[in-house]
């Protein structure tokens, strides 16, 4: 059985798809099949909305004030299930919704989906990963050529509508690249979160 909900460091996460439009060189899904208390993160086929809701109904949300969409795939690749299950969570448990994303959803869906997300998502964390298009392409390996600029555009527009928007990088980047990422975020008026890299 594959885990749809799992907990990690006192937060609860939603794993709703294994689809992803990137092949990041550092992605943990290439080295292990679990995160946190999950027993298996790999789906034979992506769950239906009914299966996602059933998993949510069986989970005790007591003590959690945020539900984070972040699994072994890019959550926006399963957009309809993301939107509907997030709406269900807010209506039933009154919980805040955070989306961890690569920021390429508008490219993937060939339209601006930010207004749809804004109806149910409160906070957005976007993987910046690198300070230049060349480095971004090399480390993220997206299926789109203009991905870096599209990701930045997504961050700029998201920052206008969500309660909180941030870019995210890991602290293993060289100092000069971290500072370059900080400048990008500052120029766009978006908060930058520097995460501690964890290999395990």
Image (cartoon, rainbow, N blue to C red):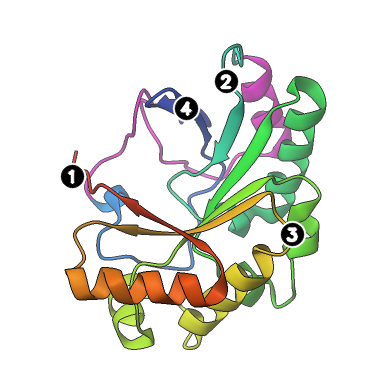
Q: Residues within 10 Å of mark 4 (few under 14, many from 20)?
A: some
Q: Residues within 10 Å of mark 3 (few under 14, many from 20)?
A: some
Q: CA distance from mark 1 to mark 2?
A: 26 Å
The secondary element bearing badge 4 is classed as strand
Q: Earlier in the sequence, mark 1 or mark 2?
A: 2
> Image check: 118 left or right of 1?
right
Which residue is tagged 3?
161
Residue 34 location, x and y as percent? 32, 34
Q: Earlier in the sequence, mark 3 or mark 1?
A: 3
Is 68 above or below relative to 166? above
Label pair 2/4, CB-CB below 8 angstroms: yes
Q: CA distance from mark 2 to mark 4?
A: 7 Å
Which residue is tagged 2?
64
Q: Residues within 10 Å of mark 2 (few under 14, many from 20)?
A: few
> Image check: 192 left or right of 150?
left
Q: Earlier in the sequence, mark 4 or mark 1?
A: 4
The quadrant of the image that shows the C terminus is: top left
Does the magenta stretch mainly form a helix, a strand or a loop? loop
Label pair 4/1, CB-CB below 8 angstroms: no
Label pair 1/2, CB-CB below 8 angstroms: no
Tell me the magenta residue range.
31-58
Q: Nearer the viewer, mark 3 or mark 2?
A: 3
Residue name at image x 79 percent, y 58 percent: 116
Q: CA distance from mark 4 to mark 3?
A: 24 Å
Q: How many marks?
A: 4
Q: Nearer the viewer, residue 43 or 112?
A: 112
Is 17 above or below relative to 96? below
- Mark number for residue 199? 1
Which residue is tagged 4?
11
Q: Earlier in the sequence, mark 2 or mark 4?
A: 4
The secondary element bearing badge 1 is classed as loop
């Amino acid at each position: 059985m594959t885990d749809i909900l799992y907990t990690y460091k006192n937060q609860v996460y939603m794993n709703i798809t294994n689809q992803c439009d990137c092949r990041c060189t550092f992605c943990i899904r290439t080295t292990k099949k679990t995160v946190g208390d999950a027993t298996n993160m790999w789906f034979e086929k992506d769950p239906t909305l009914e299966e996602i809701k059933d998993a949510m109904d069986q989970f005790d949300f007591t003590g959690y004030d945020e539900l984070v969409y972040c699994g072994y795939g890019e959550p926006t690749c399963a957009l309809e299930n993301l939107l509907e299950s997030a709406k269900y969570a807010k209506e039933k448990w009154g919980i805040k919704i955070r989306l961890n994303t690569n920021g390429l959803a508008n490219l993937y869906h060939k339209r601006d989906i930010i207004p749809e997300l804004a109806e149910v998502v409160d906070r957005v964390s976007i993987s910046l990963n690198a300070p230049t298009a060349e480095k971004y392409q090399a480390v993220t390996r997206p299926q789109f050529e203009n991905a870096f600029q599209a990701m930045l555009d997504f961050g700029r527009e998201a920052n206008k509508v969500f309660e909180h928007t941030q870019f995210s990088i890991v602290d293993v980047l060289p100092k000069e690249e971290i500072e370059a990422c900080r400048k990008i975020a500052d120029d766009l008026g978006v908060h930058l979160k520097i995460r501690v890299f964890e290999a395990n």
